[in-house]
Structure formats: structure tokens, C-alpha cells
Amino acid sequence: MGMQGTLYIIAAPSGGGKSSLVKALLESTPNLQVSVSYTTRPMRPREQQGVDYHFVDQARFDTLRDSGVFLEHAEVFGHCYGTSRAWVTERLLQGIDIILEIDWQGKRQIAQSFPEAVSIFVLPPSRAVLEQRLRARGQDDDEVIARRMQAATNEISHWNEFDYLVLNDDFQTAVADMQAIFRARRLRREPQGARLRRLLAELLVY
């Protein structure tokens, strides 16, 4: 049985607003879920186990990685992240669209197993705004923010590997742009034909 759902990859530099956009998409788009990644980084305030991430130690992560559990995995700022292959595949087969919040490294790995995955890169309106957003979090000191800004330059340099670019300047406009991508993808002939199979059969009766 072929995949029924669509796999979406959404990437952005740290502070680009990716998480807020994904939250808005989940609230406004039916039949859509976000994959919960495994990570070795510490849990932050207000985060929940199994909701924001599956928090594991390095030994557990290494075991899962070496066992082929991950569809993709990467190391970011000294912490490891991975996506469950079984979870993603099961839901795609159920006809559920899935979002992966990963970086360009993960996107390259995903392309090997799911070349049909749709990729979206979110851009900040400027470097100044990006740094302002990072500082507004109140979680990192100057040294960490400087590292994140340097990493952002590297992340953004891979923009041309993605299918779509969304500018996150005005938040509501960015959400509407994301929704337009999802809506257009769902109106393609193949998925729409499957959903409207009975109607098409009825309309084609002479």
C-alpha cells in the first residue's frame, strides 16, 4: 500500500519562528500531526515528556540510532535529535499528513527514504530581528546567542535545497502562506482523486 499522507519538512534558523508557525498550522489544519523527536538535550521549563520531545540520555539515544529506529538524526548545539521511522510511516499509511521540524541535515537524510517529501524553509525578516527574538526568550547568554547567530548563517545558506520559502515577518501572513502550501498540496489530482473516489464514480455513470 502506498503512502496516503504527505510528509512535510519545516526548517528555520533558531529564532525563526518555526515552532509558533507549526502550532498555528496544527490548530487550523485538520488531519495533521507533528512528529515528536527524541533528544538528549535537557528538558526546559514548561516542556513535557512525550509532548514536546522524547527526552532520553545519550546511551539510550545511541542504542536507538544504532538499531535503525531513526528516520533521520542530527547533532545540534551539542545535543542529538532523532525522528522515529515507525511512527512516521504508520501515520502516513493512515492518511495523516506529518510535519517534521528538522534542519537541513535531517532534510537530506529524509530525501533518501521519502524523496516526495515537501520541504519548507522559514526566513526571518532580518538578522537584527532574529537576534532580538533569541534575546527575548531569556534562555541564553551572549556567548550562546552569538553561537546561534553563527549557526543561523549556516542554516540559511541551505535555503535553496527546499521546495518553498516562507518569510516570517508578519506572523498572520506567514501562517496564511503556510496554509496555502498545505491546501494546494491536498488539492493535487492523486490525493484529491482518492478522497473523491465515490463522487467521481457516481459522476461518470452514463
Image (cartoon, rainbow, N blue to C red):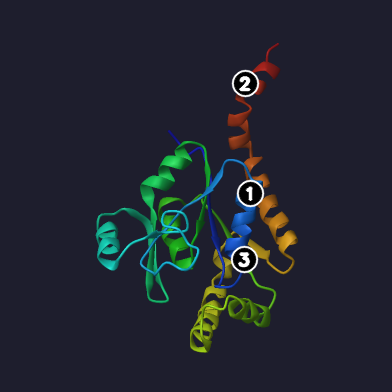
Q: In this view, does 27 lie above or below 193?
A: below
Residue under circle 3? Answer: 122
Residue under circle 1? Answer: 27
Disc 2, disc 1: CB below 8 Å? no
Near mark 2 (Cα within 10 A), the count class, few <14, some 14-19 or many ≥20, is few
Near mark 3 (Cα within 10 A), the count class, few <14, some 14-19 or many ≥20, is many
Q: In which quarter of the image is residue 108?
A: bottom left
Q: Name the amino acid type tagged 1.
A: Glu
In the rendered view, does 135 fall on the left or right side of 44? right
Q: Name the amino acid type tagged 3.
A: Val
- Spatial separation of the CA atoms under disc 2 and disc 3: 38 Å
Q: Which residue lies furthest to the top in this view?
A: 206
Q: In which quarter of the image is residue 136?
A: bottom right
In the rendered view, does 58 fall on the left or right side of 118? left
- Spatial separation of the CA atoms under disc 2 and disc 1: 29 Å
Q: Which residue lies furthest to the bottom in this view?
A: 143
* SS under mark 2: helix
- Spatial separation of the CA atoms under disc 3 and disc 1: 19 Å
Near mark 1 (Cα within 10 A), the count class, few <14, some 14-19 or many ≥20, is few
* SS under mark 1: helix
Disc 2, disc 3: CB below 8 Å? no
Q: In this view, does 34 lie above or below 58?
A: above
Image quarter in which the C terminus is found: top right
Q: Name the amino acid type tagged 2.
A: Arg
Which marked residue is nearer to the observer: mark 2 or mark 3? Answer: 3
Q: Which mark is residue 198?
A: 2
Which marked residue is nearer to the observer: mark 2 or mark 1? Answer: 1
User: Which residue is at 46% across, 41% downward?
Assistant: 91
Q: Provide residue 117's location: percent of width, then percent of height.
A: 51, 51
User: Which residue is at 39% across, 69% downward?
Assistant: 41
Judging depth in this view, the residue of 200 and 20 nearest the camera is 20
Q: Provide residue 163's location: percent of width, then percent of height.
A: 59, 59
